[in-house]
Image: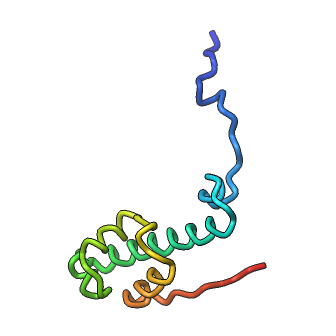
Amino acid sequence: MRKSKSRADERRRVKSSGNVFLDLGFDQADAEVMKLRTQVMIRMEQHMKAKGWTQTEAARRLGIKQPRVSRLIKGKSEDFSLDMLLKLAARAGLHPSVKLAA
């Protein structure tokens, strides 16, 4: 006996563009900045974890208060500009760079 299709199977699947923010309907420019901010935040969290930093230690090294470190780790990208994230990455000992492609 064959099972009927589930609701999930009945939904139309759309291939991702590679940028979830673009897929969610943000315009191209905003989607690119949101994607970059998210990538920097993820890398920062990985770096802090690899270094074994507590949030208090990370705050001291980054020159920000612990609640901001918490928001960084939680991925609250709306709380950080790309400029600030790149500055924090440099303070953490990472070497941020921007590559532009046509």
Q: In the current view of this chain or complex, which residue is farthest to the right?
A: 102
* Horizontal side, residue 91 vs residue 63: left or right: right
Q: Position of residue 68 (x, y in %)?
A: 31, 73
Q: Position of residue 87 (x, y in %)?
A: 44, 87
Residue displayed at 63% across by 58% down:
26
Toward which corner of the image does residue 57 lie, by quadrant? bottom left
Foreground residue, 43 or 84?
A: 84
Residue displayed at 29% across by 87% down:
63
* Horizontal side, residue 42 vs residue 101: left or right: left
Q: In the current view of this chain or complex, which residue is farthest to the top?
A: 1
Q: Position of residue 13 (x, y in %)?
A: 68, 39
Residue displayed at 34% across by 77% down:
48
Number of marks:
0
Q: Give the vertical position of 27 relative to 102 (above or below).
A: above
Q: Give the vertical position of 82 relative to 7 (above or below).
A: below
Q: Position of residue 44 (x, y in %)?
A: 41, 76
Toward which corner of the image does residue 5 lie, by quadrant? top right
**Picture quarter with the N terminus:** top right
Q: Give the vertical position of 17 relative to 95 (above or below).
A: above
Foreground residue, 1 or 48?
A: 48
**Picture quarter with the C terminus:** bottom right
Display colour scheme: rainbow
* Horizontal side, residue 57 vs residue 21: left or right: left
Residue displayed at 69% across by 35% down:
12
Foreground residue, 76 or 95?
A: 76
